[in-house]
Image (spheres, rainbow, N blue to C red):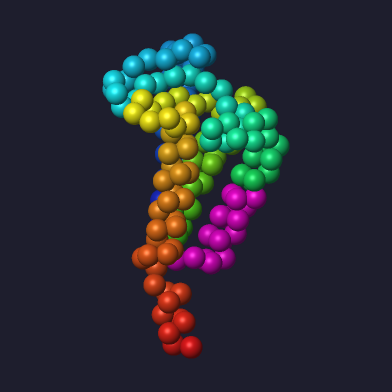
Amino acid sequence: MFYILLLLTAGAIVALDQITKALVVASIPLGGYVEAIPGLFHLTHIHNTGAAFSMLEGGRTFFLILTAVFLIGVVYCVVKKVFSRPYLWIFAVLAGGAIGNLIDRVVNGYVVDMIALDFMNFAVFNVADIFVTGGAVVLVVYALLIDQSGKKKEKSE
């Protein structure tokens, strides 16, 4: 049951990402924007062939390979039970975001981005990016500050 919940979590993230992208594509012309919460953020419609801030623009093949390697690694870790359950939840969140952007890259050759912050100069991003970034932050915080298993092993040696 636990593994089904992981799959459902990743699937829900993919669905949320793809639905929001489809709504933006259907309702905002490319390059257009709609005010959401003035002073906080607006929705826009752009195509991004790179990563955040369009870094590595045009690197579709690189991102396809990187995502495939990551997803294969996640499946391996789940099957071989390499990590404890908290890590698997984090990996499910990361995988959901990665798959959301992977679908765009495979189908369109670019990722649809739509969330633009008004209060700071930041990259336009999408729902998948929120889960990839948030998942990465949680992974680092959990591994460094919460998971004490590595420290306990060191003390006993």
- Using the image as rendered, state which of residue 61 and residue 17 is in the foreground: 61
Please provide percent x and percent y for residue 30: 52, 14
The answer to whether 80 appears left or right of 38 in the picture is: right
The answer to whether 90 appears left or right of 74 in the picture is: left
Q: In this view, does 146 lie above or below 118?
A: below
Please provide percent x and percent y for residue 12: 42, 39
Question: In the rendered view of the protein, which quadrant contains the N terminus?
Answer: bottom left
Number of dots carrying numbers = 0
Farthest residue toward the bottom? 157
**Residue 19 in sight from this viewpoint:** no
Please provide percent x and percent y for residue 64: 66, 39
Question: Going 47% across and 37% down the picture, which residue do you hit?
Answer: 129
Question: Going 65% across and 50% down the picture, which residue do you hit?
Answer: 69
- Give residue 118's quadrant in the image: top left
- Give residue 37's quadrant in the image: top left
Q: Does the magenta stretch include residue 79?
A: yes
Dominant secondary structure of the magenta stretch? helix
Please provide percent x and percent y for residue 78: 53, 60
**Residue 102 in sight from this viewpoint:** yes
Question: Going 60% across and 56% down the picture, which residue do you hit?
Answer: 73
Q: Give the range drawn in magenta.
A: 69-86
- Using the image as rendered, state which of residue 109 and residue 7 is in the foreground: 109
